[in-house]
Amino acid sequence: MFGIAIHGGAGSLPRAQMDAERERRYRQGLEDALAAGYAVLESGGTSVAAVTRAVTVLEDDPQFNAGRGAVFTFDGRNELDAAIMDGTSLAAGAVCGVTHVRNPIELARAVMEHSEYVMLSGSGAEEFALSRGFTLVPRSYFRTEERWRQLERIRGGEAGLSPLTISHVGTVGAVARDARGGLAAATSTGGMTGKRYHRIGDSPIIGAGTYADDRSCAVSATGHGEIFIRAAVAHDIGARMRHGGRGLARAVREVVHGELAALGGEGGVIAIDGRGEIVMEFRAEGMFRASRRQGESAYVDIYGADRPAP
Ligand code: ASP
């Protein structure tokens, strides 16, 4: 049973800003990425290839906070983070603070497959990208007017706004199980709007925002990164399965509604286990999410079951 799940971020998605046309475009973006990842699995590709493909499509979609359309730092730059993990070998690769790499998830995969390291940062990561034949893009490639306006609202000190309340939403991720049972997870983000001091969130940190282990599950997270790091969310879910005998759904629920809730963390996770079971759970108004398992039809949703979309 192969399968894939993807997310496009979680958080407060104000209904007022979500008209029918906008919602249709988000759903289309999720469907396209899901179909791309599913096609890799269907043609016998690995889970690593499938999550890379799905995340690349989401990075290229300017609606999401990853690759083109990423949020801005306080200084008006786009600093991108990404990570990938292969649950069979426990190999992992991550990049953080890159500013010229069109698809950071592909660079993270290159770090995993072609370097002796797990995590590269900033200009060093870009030097490595050049050595691997990546073409770098100008900073302007990532800019969208909507993200710029969000930054201006934060910089203008609009009452009640903080990087936590304004759209960091849109981080992307994918988890998959391939036909031979291999699990993989991938996550990519621009981080939080208005971030300073080369802040790095949970997404590229193995065990926090991204983790995969064939003995338990693959997890990609989204939400308030500082709290996800402190709770080691992705690793904790797997550890509860491996050492605590939990099933996937229970492990995810305990971490999202127990550990995260205790720290006041908003966000969610997508996860898949060795049997192809998929769980998508969040503590937020909504989470852009989609999944498809072998022989089943695609599921795409934004809001919670108790909050039906308009
Ligand atoms: N987790 C990401 C970060 O903190 C942001 C998000 O998922 O919305 O960088």
Image: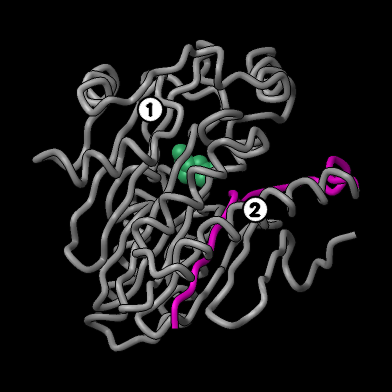
Q: Residue 224: in sight, yes or no?
A: no
Q: Is residue 271 magenta?
A: no
Query: From what the image shows, is residue 108 above or below residue 160?
Result: below
Q: Residue at x 44, y 34 (%)?
A: 103
Location of residue 92 in the rendering, given as x and y in whole percent from the top left corner: 23, 51
Name the disc covering residue 199, or none. 1
| Highlighted magenta segment, given as a residue range | 1-19
Q: Quadrant of the N terminus?
A: bottom left
Q: How many marks?
A: 2
Query: From what the image shows, is residue 282 above or below residue 75?
Result: below
Classify mark 1 as within 8 Å of ligand 1 or not, answering yes or no.
Answer: yes
For the residue pair 277 and 36, the one nearer the viewer reads as 36
Which amino acid, mark 1?
Arg
The residue that disc 2 covers is 32
For the residue pair 218 and 232, the one nearer the viewer reads as 218
Which amino acid, mark 2?
Asp
